[in-house]
Image (tube, helix red, strand yellow):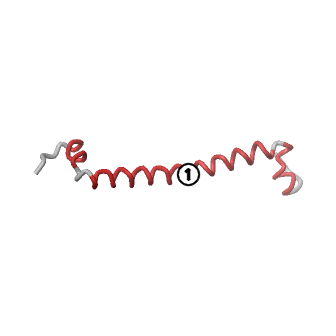
């Protein structure tokens, strides 16, 4: 495709809200997902620390000391 100007490119032939909205939605998802994974990871680590690591021993098969 060929555009005569930058404004024509950003207008996307009249479909700009759909095209740029899709890009925006994906960008938000790519920012939120790693943050959510990190929060779940930190919560899981805190839970293991609070429980004394017993759950970790069960998962790895380590004997309790």
Q: Position of residue 44 (x, y in %)?
A: 35, 50
State the residue lying farthest toward the bottom: 6
Please give left or right for residue 59 compared with residue 46 in the image.
left
Q: Position of residue 37 (x, y in %)?
A: 46, 50
Which residue is rendered at x = 73% and y = 46% of the image? 21
Please give left or right for residue 50 compared with residue 13 in the image.
left
* The N terminus: image quadrant: top right
Q: Position of residue 7 (x, y in %)?
A: 86, 55
State the residue lying farthest toward the front: 50
Closest to the observer: 24 or 36?
Answer: 36
Label 1 neighbour load within 10 Å: few <14, some 14-19, many 20+:
few
Q: Position of residue 50 (x, y in %)?
A: 28, 54
Closest to the observer: 47 or 37?
Answer: 47
Please give left or right for residue 58 compared with residue 5 in the image.
left
Whether 23 is drawn above or below 6: the answer is above
Q: Label 1's element? A: helix
Closest to the observer: 64 or 61?
Answer: 64
Which residue is denoted by mark 1 in the rendering?
Answer: 32
Closest to the observer: 6 or 21?
Answer: 21
Please give left or right for residue 49 compared with residue 64 in the image.
right
Which residue is rendered at x = 59% and y = 48% of the image? 29
Which residue is rendered at x = 12% and y = 48% of the image? 64
State the residue lying farthest toward the left: 65
Which residue is rendered at x = 82% and y = 52% of the image? 9
């Amino acid at each position: 495709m060929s555009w005569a100007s930058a404004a024509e490119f950003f207008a996307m032939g009249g479909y700009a809200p759909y095209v740029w909205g899709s890009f925006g939605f994906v960008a938000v998802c790519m920012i939120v997902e790693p943050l959510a994974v990190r929060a779940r990871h930190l919560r899981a680590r805190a839970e293991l620390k609070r429980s004394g690591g017993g759950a970790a021993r069960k998962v790895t098969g380590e004997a309790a000391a």
